[in-house]
Amino acid sequence: MDQQLICELNLALIPQTELASRHITFSRQMAGRYRPVIQLSGVTPRVAFTPHVTIYQVPVQVRDLPGLRAALLDLAAKAPQLWLTATEYRSNQDEGSFEIRYGAADRLMELQADTIAVVNPLRGDLLLERDPAGRLLSERMDESGLAGDNIRRTGFDAVGDPAHGGLFYPHVTLNWFEPGTSVELNATDWPPLSHFDGRFVALGIFLLGPYGTCAQRLATLHLAA
C-alpha cells in the first residue's frame, strides 16, 4: 500500500521582532499568575511557541510542500506588510485560552482569502485531526451553521470577515491555561492594548503544534515593504 506522508501546517502572520518580544513578555507575566499549559517562548526557527496570527490551518501531503511554498512565496511578494490594531483582551475559560484580539483589516481578510484559494486545492479531502481546542475535526464535519460549512469547504472553521458574519477573528494567543481557569481581565498592571499594536511582516509556514500553536517554522515568506 502506498501511504503518503502528511504534515499539518499552520500558515500564520509573523509580527516584527520587537512586537513579538512584547507578546512573549506579557505571556510570561501571565504564566506567573496562572498555571500555564502553553506560554510563548521564542521566535527562532527551532522548536518554540511563537507569537503569530493564524491565517489557515491545513494538512497537506509532504510531496506538495514545494508547490505550496512556491505559491505562497508568490502571494507574499505581492501582499503588503500589515499594521494591526489590538482591540481587546479575551479569555475562554472553558478551553483555557487567553489572547489579544486584533481588528480584521481589509487587507488581512484579502490575505486569508488568497491563502485559502491557493492552498485548499492541495489539501484535497484531507482533514486536520483536531482543532485548537482539541475537538476532533471529523466529528465537526456534520456541524450546522457557518462553522460546519467552512470546515466542509476548507477544512478550517475560522474563515471570513466578521464584519459580514464571518468567523475569522484575528488574534495572538498568549497562553493556554488549565481548562476552567478564570482570568481577571484588564487587571491594573496589564499593558494598554495599544502596547500590542504593530506591524506583521511575513507569512510563516509552521508545523502545527498542540493547541493550534506554531511549534516549528519551516519557511518565512516576507511580505512586500
Image: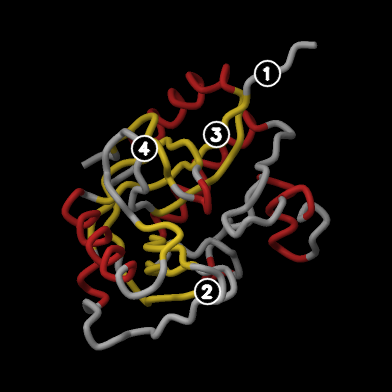
Q: CA distance from mark 1 to mark 4?
A: 24 Å
Based on the displayed image, in which of its 4 quarters is residue 4 positioned?
top right
Q: CA distance from mark 4 to mark 2?
A: 26 Å
* Residue 105 visible from this viewpoint: no
Q: CA distance from mark 2 to mark 1?
A: 36 Å
Q: Which mark is residue 92?
A: 2
* Residue 17 visible from this viewpoint: yes
Quadrant in the picture for the C terminus: top left
The spot of residue 24 in percent (x, y) is: 26, 58
Residue mark closest to the camera, 4 vs 2: 4
Residue mark closest to the camera, 1 vs 4: 4
Q: Which mark is residue 47?
A: 4
Q: CA distance from mark 3 to mark 4?
A: 27 Å
Residue mark closest to the camera, 3 vs 4: 4
Q: Residue at x 57, y 30 (%)?
A: 7
Based on the displayed image, in which of its 4 quarters is residue 74 positioned?
top left
Residue that badge 1 annotates: 4
